[in-house]
Amino acid sequence: MVHKYAPKSVVRRLPVYLRILDNLILNDVEIISSKELSEETGFSAEQIRKDLAFFGAFGTRGSGYNTIFLREKILKIIGLDEQTNITVIGAGHLGIALIRYNVQKNPYVNVVAAFDIDASLVGQRILDVEINDISKLKETVKKYDVKVAIMTVPAEHAQSVVEKVIESGINVIFNFAPVKLRVPENIHVHNVDLSIELQSLIYYATANR
Amino acid sequence: MVHKYAPKSVVRRLPVYLRILDNLILNDVEIISSKELSEETGFSAEQIRKDLAFFGAFGTRGSGYNTIFLREKILKIIGLDEQTNITVIGAGHLGIALIRYNVQKNPYVNVVAAFDIDASLVGQRILDVEINDISKLKETVKKYDVKVAIMTVPAEHAQSVVEKVIESGINVIFNFAPVKLRVPENIHVHNVDLSIELQSLIYYATANR
């Protein structure tokens, strides 16, 4: 069965709603209108109503959304109601930063292992996460049902690494290498290219030069 | 004089064109059509023509764009024709990763210094970049005409740090802290929230669960 996904733009906004709901609940706010959510997010109230309506009727016309109810719904829609096992491939500074952040501050994921090709790193631990040789990837993915790989490897290794990742059974990849990976259609790759983002920022720094 | 910026979406695509042009020039390709650029980028040919036309007439109808000419134009538009001085605030693993990457692989910027509040880090160097106490920020910004600050500080410190950054004279901020910073209108903040991006990815990993 082919799964029909929600539009990408909607999926990208869901965790933003979640973070705002977390804050509201922390501050004992029980009800929020789409207009108030709009002020918090910068998305239009209409956009927000449309986004949420995509998954069902979660609000009450004229009164708004119950924060706790909506948070639980969104957690379920994204799949954050259960912890997801993930791995980090490439244990350089960026990899270590992402391991530490996710272990310490992200309650929704469990970093089961890290991988690297550098023999001097293998066996070391970042917090409780062991760095393994990349040859152990498939075994680990099967054992822990790992769903997502974060790839922080140099650009020149990214294509060969992503092929190993796919072969291990992982379908969802968060790629930080500044290259376009060639992958089969059923594989979901999300690229974050920090150098491209920095370059586009320089436009605003120099437009008056 | 108020500078009129190009639309954000256009500015974000410019460095993507640049990277593709770099590759084409490396492979001695002299002319590229918007259709071929479309295949490389995934943006529509019409979008590409519109983006580039925003800044002037760079192509020849029916034959395409000269790669070297277009690359030079885009470098100038973004402001990458001269190196831009930047700083990294927060010398944790993410900060170190970004310093190393930009020093070693980004020819368009010059990381003049890093800053941290941790006294045990002050005086250390990442490659050639010295970590200074944050109290030295303003002095450094003035001395080197620093245009962009990359902020990799914990969420709880981000607001107080961004106020120091603005006070130092920097107007463009690349923020990795997962919080919405309150800044005056003339300050350009670009947020990359890696935990939100990872959370939205989990949707694709668990939609069939």
Image (cartoon, coloured by chain):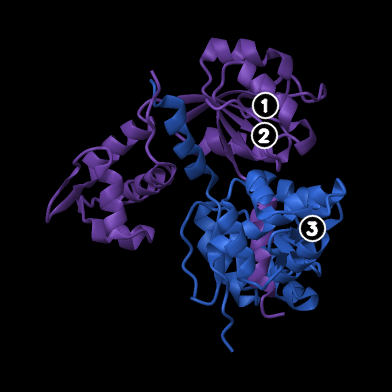
Chain colours: A purple, B blue
Residue identified by numbered label 1: A162
Marks 2/3 in contact by CB < 8 Å: the verdict is: no
Residue identified by numbered label 3: B67
Marks 2/1 in contact by CB < 8 Å: the verdict is: yes
* Mark 2 → mark 1, Cα distance in angstroms: 8 Å
Corner quadrant of residue A160: top right
* Mark 2 → mark 3, Cα distance in angstroms: 23 Å
Horizontal and vertical percent for residue B17? 69, 55
Residue in view at x 36 percent, y 44 percent: A18
Horizontal and vertical percent for residue B110? 80, 62
In this rendering, is residue B47 above or below A97? below
Exactly how many numbered labels are in the figure?
Answer: 3
In this rendering, is residue B3 above or below B113? below
Q: Nearer the viewer, mark 2 or mark 1?
A: 2
Residue in view at x 83 percent, y 60 percent: B68
Tag 2: amino acid: Leu
Horizontal and vertical percent for residue A19? 38, 47
Residue identified by numbered label 2: A181
Tag 1: amino acid: Val
Marks 2 and 1 belong to one chain: yes
Horizontal and vertical percent for residue B15? 68, 57
Is residue B182 among the parts visible in the rendering? yes
Asked whether B38 or A18 is in front, the reply is B38
Residue at the far bottom: name it. B1
* Mark 3 → mark 1, Cα distance in angstroms: 30 Å
Q: Chain of mark 3?
A: B
Residue in view at x 72 percent, y 80 percent: A209
Dot 2: element? loop
Asked whether A55 or B89 is in front, the reply is A55
